[in-house]
Amino acid sequence: MLSRFFSYYKPHKKLFILDFSSAVVVALLELAFPLAVSWFIDSLLPTGNWSTIVSVSVGLFLVYLMSTFLQYIVTYWGHKLGTNIETDMRGQLFEHVQKQSFSFFDNTKTGHIMSRITNDLFDIGELAHHGPEDLFIAVMTFIGAFWIMVTINVQLALVTILVLPLLALVMTFCNIKMNKAWKRMYGEIADVNARVEDSVSGVRVVQSFTNEKFENERFRENNGKFRKAKIAGYRIMALTGSSIYMMTRFIILTVLIYGAWLSFTGRLSYGELVGFVLYVNVLFKPVDKISSLMELYPKGMAGFKRFIELLDSEPEIKDIKEAVEVETLRGDIALKNVDFSYDGKHPVLNGVNLNIHAGETVAFVGPSGAGKTTICSLIPRFYDVEGGTITIDGIDVRHMTKHSLRAQIGIVQQDVFLFTGTLRENIAYGKLDATEEEIREAARNAHLEEFIESLPDGYDTQIGQRGLKLSGGQKQRLAIARMFLKNPPILILDEATSALDTETELIIQEALNKLAENRTTLIIAHRLATIRNADRIVVVTKDGIAEEGGHDELIEQGGIFANLHRVQYQR
Ligand code: ADP
Ligand code: MG
């Protein structure tokens, strides 16, 4: 775990060396200071030589000046180092999350992911900056101070050191407690985030059910749990700090009394006593530092562990080594004995066989929950089949690179996701390097141009968060414009028009028909009018593919489809 942590320093080696060496010099100067005071009192004061005193003071001033500069470096460049490392980690995590398979998102709350990417890494920067530096300086200062104390007076040094094991014991105990407390806090804040994400993205549902009170209550519960966890952590932190403070003051008192006695009996000079008391303080600095590290370390490491955990979760759907980059596919799709379930327990598809020819338009109908969307999700490999194969142009989809496979497939769903930004940017999402002319042509083909041009800002109109300023039909047309730009040989329309009123649907249907030209098209639809033009209709039920054939052919058969047809058209 630690070596993994240190690997993040590599790109910032220079910064680390600069910060670290400055910190060491500052610590060395601190270490020398009491010696200078001691010498000042014992050797310089008795001479009464004012000009030496002045020149020593000037020298001291220069040393302080240097120390000030170095401290600036440590604070600024050190924190810069920490922030850089935190930023690297956050970027890496974001990239990793983007790679995850659908199944990962099925099982992970968005709020939890947000929490990992933001909060969990907050303390890492601090730890990265202070961790190794403070530890090294603490050890160096401790050994140095103690060694000088021994040379001043052995007995006094021994008395000081006697209490330290007790201190270490208390600190270890507190450390364990603190570790637990911070881990709990991170879990709770993740839950808080998940709640916020839920309530905010679902605010329309919340308000239409007027369940604000219920949501507040739920949130209060999570928020309260977080508060409890955080406060518990701080209590232990406070306890640790107070215990350490008390012990250090106790030692100083002991040294003062014992040192006074030594000096009365002529075994310690005044300068030595003052120097010694100052060294006791220097000695406690590393103890202080280590105790604050003990707060920082578990906090940072708890975050780092959660970071690593997520970073090490392999995406389920990956390219195999021999995966090929496919160029433009024709679009012959074949499912052979396909078995699939989402959870490994409840089969959704069982031995499904289906052949779709290039350029064909195939419509899927059937009760909701039958597995129509599932079939369509398997083709772009959003999930992998459990048994059987899916091939496109005779090549198993698992033998293609994910990227090149998905570049060949366009999907329009009932819910259109719009990104924060302008209309232009949202259309261009289908082809990031699209030219202005291409974007306009796509909008025209999607029957969206007239609407866009009626807006005061035209293509530069900002879409409110998630595109809430557009109607369902407009969003749908925007999704279609994206598809015109992407221009994939295979098209999947999953209830793309189901949420629209019949009139809007007619306009969009026209755009969709144009989009479907010269492509292999899979349409899932509830309204049978939508699929009248399909070359073939596939009826999917819970037991698999029940019927397959042309529109009139299926009606003649008098099976499930004929029944559906009768229900929809006779009222
Ligand atoms: P359809 O599109 O025909 O309405 P789906 O393919 O969406 O049906 O769903 C088929 C079955 O798989 C349903 O029982 C549904 O509950 C289940 N299912 C769909 N998506 C998931 C998912 N992401 N995780 C677990 N089960 C799912
Ligand atoms: Mg569906």
Image (cartoon, rainbow, N blue to C red):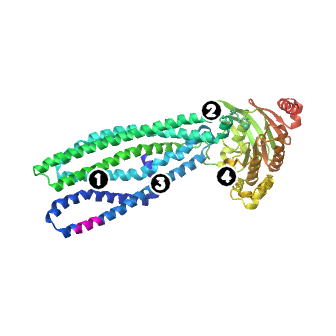
Label 1, label 4: how far apart the Cα atoms are: 59 Å
Q: CA distance from mark 3 to mark 2?
A: 42 Å
- Residue 83 image label: 3
Q: Do we see residue 481 in this rendering? A: yes
Label ID, residue 344: 2
Residue type marked 3? Thr
Residue named by callout 1: 141
x, y (%) of residue 354?
76, 38
Which is nearer the N-term, disc 2 or disc 1? 1
Quarter of the displayed picture in which ligand 2 can be seen: top right
Indicate which disc, 1 or 3, sits on the residue closer to the N terminus.
Answer: 3
Answer with mark 1 or mark 4, whichever residue precedes in sequence.
1
User: Of tags 2 and 1, which is closer to the observer?
Assistant: 1
Residue 202 drawn at (x, y percent): 65, 39
| Pointer 4 residue | 325
Give how far across and how far down residue 491 sits, in percent. 76, 46
Element at badge 2?
A: loop
